């Protein structure tokens, strides 16, 4: 029985990208919910060794944020609502901008947290096709995964075509 090196991905870049748009406010309006627990799980599972680079970004302004700000702010309304523009401006979140290829000679794990509201599915699929499903790029061993969670929500639901408030919705008291 042979041994495999402890860390085969010693050249790994990890990019955690959080949709910073107002459509996400409803996910942080309920304390201790599945959304905030998922953010904790994502942050806790990433390997933070000396050869792994981890960056935290807020999609929409591409602002790099610290690990501590990610842990604290991404669970707060002001991260999404633009009420503190010196720290976090009001933004729309072009999710496709978070889909970037890895640096030369490195592997990359990109995590995108979003509700996909208002995003152009064609732009997202084109970016995935360009960087991850391109048959002209040799030795491209990329994988794309989706993890969806059912969570509590209390806030506005927006019309994906206009971006305007469509209706208020709350999961409070609902079991399904």
Image: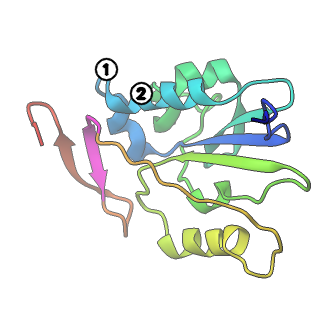
Q: Quadrant of the N terminus?
A: top right
Query: Mark 2 falls on what kind of element?
Result: helix
Q: Colour scheme in the image? A: rainbow
Mark in front: 2 vs 1: 2
Spot occupied by residue 104 in the image (x, y as percentages of width and height):
91, 56
Spot occupied by residue 166 in the image (x, y as percentages of width and height):
24, 57
2 or 124: which is nearer to us?
A: 2
Q: Is residue 78 found inside the magenta-colored segment of the image? A: no
**Which stretch appears magenta?**
151-158
Identity of the residue drawn at 69% across and 45% down: 62
Q: What residue sits right under mark 2 in the picture?
A: 36
**Residue found at the far front of this picture:** 1
Taking 3 as reference, is 59 left or right? left
First-in-chain label (2 vs 1) = 1
Query: Mark 1 falls on what kind of element?
Result: loop
* Mark carried by residue 60: none
**Label 1 Cα crowd, 10 Å radius (few <14 / some 14-19 / many 20+):** few
């Amino acid at each position: 029985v042979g041994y495999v090196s402890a860390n085969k991905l010693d050249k790994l870049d990890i990019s955690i990208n959080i949709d910073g748009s107002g459509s996400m406010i409803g996910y942080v309006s309920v304390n201790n919910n599945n959304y905030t627990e998922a953010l904790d799980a994502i942050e806790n599972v990433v390997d933070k060794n000396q050869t792994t680079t981890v960056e935290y970004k807020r999609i929409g302004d591409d602002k790099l944020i610290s690990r501590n700000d990610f842990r604290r702010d991404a669970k707060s309304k002001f991260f999404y609502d633009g009420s503190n523009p010196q720290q976090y401006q009001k933004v729309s979140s072009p999710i496709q901008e978070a889909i970037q290829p890895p640096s030369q000679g490195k592997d990359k794990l990109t995590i995108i947290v979003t509700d996909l509201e208002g995003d152009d599915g064609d732009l997202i699929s084109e970016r995935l096709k360009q960087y991850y499903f391109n048959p002209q790029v040799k030795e491209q061993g990329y994988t794309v995964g989706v993890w969806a969670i059912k969570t509590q929500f209390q806030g506005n639901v927006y019309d994906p075509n206009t971006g305007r408030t469509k209706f208020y919705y709350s999961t409070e008291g609902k079991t399904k």
